[in-house]
Amino acid sequence: MALVQAKNIDLHLPYQQLPTKKQKKITIHCLEYGHSDQKVEYISLTPETDVIKSRLQCIKCINGPYSHFRQQVAVLEEVLSDCMNVMKHTHFQGNFYQEFSNLYHSLKFDISKDDIKFKCATIRKQFLYLIQEFEQDLLQNYDKYQELYDKIKQQVDNLKTVFDFSELQGHLENYAKQGPNPPPKSQKNINNVLNDYVKKLHEEVTQEKKQTDLDSLKTKINEFTKKSCFHIHKLDQGMENIQNIIEEMKKTFSPNNFTQSQLSNDYISEVLKKIDKDYVDFTKVEKIKNLYSSIHEGLKYDVVLNHLQKEESSKLLFIFKCSNSQIFGAYISPTLTSSLLFSLSKEQIYTLKINKKPLKYNKDANDNSELFSLGDQDLIIQSSFTKCRSKLGSLFDLSGYSIANHEMHLANAVEFEIVALEIFKL
Ligand SMILES: [Zn+2]
């Protein structure tokens, strides 16, 4: 059921947010038995007239009696705002108008400049809110941090007297006033004062002082770091990540012609060209069939397993997105040697080393087991899509790239979570 709901939300979401997509509504009650509490939201476009009672359907209809025809409905509200949306979500194989509609929607002509301005204003507002919230949070944590620090302050103050530099600072300031050629006597004096200071730093301390001051400070600092550590560099790291994300957003207009994939970046064109040089042709790329998208259907291991079993002799293209935004994928071909593993984030392609089947799936997978692997250990996906692993170079060739850590390279982590997956049939 969750699968259907996810799909349903996705059908509605993109346009509601955009101001130019004026919502037009016609309220019609569903006539299907037991659906009188539901409003009609869909128009069935199923070609056979005898398999459905009514073309006007509600959410209960497409989840229940007509679930087999879920891929054959138009969203009424979307059609009312623009008739070009009629075949936007359908998949009628070999239908001329379906192909025309797919081409039209691949270009996204229905999005205006005002929509873009609205999107950017929304992002700006959300971003400012998040930053404000983050700052408050950080300052609150700093207060707690300060409370902890106050507990060790006395000991720090006791020990730091030896570092006191104020007297030396006075000497150095006077010495500096004597200009670039101070008299030899002054040179000797300043050196003596510094010698005394350094001597104190190297003085042997008593065992008792060590135990009462240093050892007890050690214990307290250990307690302190267990509770809270201050990683100030994370702020700069975070900003760097934000800049990278904005660079990626700048590619909203880009020559990537694989519009069916919502996960891929521009580098996918290179991957597709490597798979088959015919994919320089936009219309060929548009013909690639989307078998599964977790964005629409939710991450479901049983659905993925079902596709893997059914499409064992097909050419399959996988695209994964990790929780840390790394994007990578694989192309698995029955003619084994043309199979590829690739990283879209790092813009790298790895070819198969030996003529051995790179895709192995676990037909007995349950929700707590391994689901499938690509290239022995190059990529191992769990049914839960968490705790996935990668050991690059097991079956795919890494030559041409300098890869320091084979287990960290693909996902920037030894264990990682997959948050989105697309599977295409080529
Ligand atoms: Zn209904």
Image: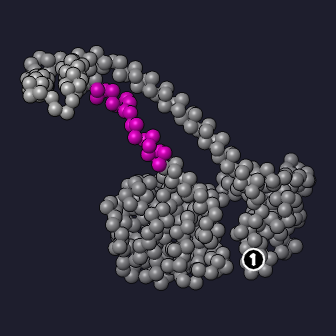
212 in relation to 140, above or below? above
Image side of residue 153 versus residue 75, left or right: left
In this view, the residue in front, 394 or 219, is 219
Q: Which residue is depicted at the point 37% across and 22% down?
A: 148
Q: How is the image coloured?
A: one colour
Among the 4 quarters of the image, the one containing residue 205: top left
Label 1 sits on residue: 99
Image quarter (top left, top right, bottom left or bottom right) of the N terminus: bottom right
In the image, the segment drawn in magenta is 221-240
Q: Secondary structure at mark 1?
A: helix
Image side of residue 180 versus residue 53, left or right: left
Q: Could you say where residue 231 lies in the image, as x and y percent from the top left? A: 39, 37
Q: Which residue is depicted at the point 82% across and 59% down?
A: 78
Image side of residue 198 versus residue 387, left or right: left
Q: Which residue is depicted at the point 76% across and 65% down?
A: 109
Residues packed near mark 1 inside 10 Å, few (<14), some (14 to 19) or many (20 plus): some
In this view, the residue in front, 237 or 183, is 183
The number of discs equals: 1
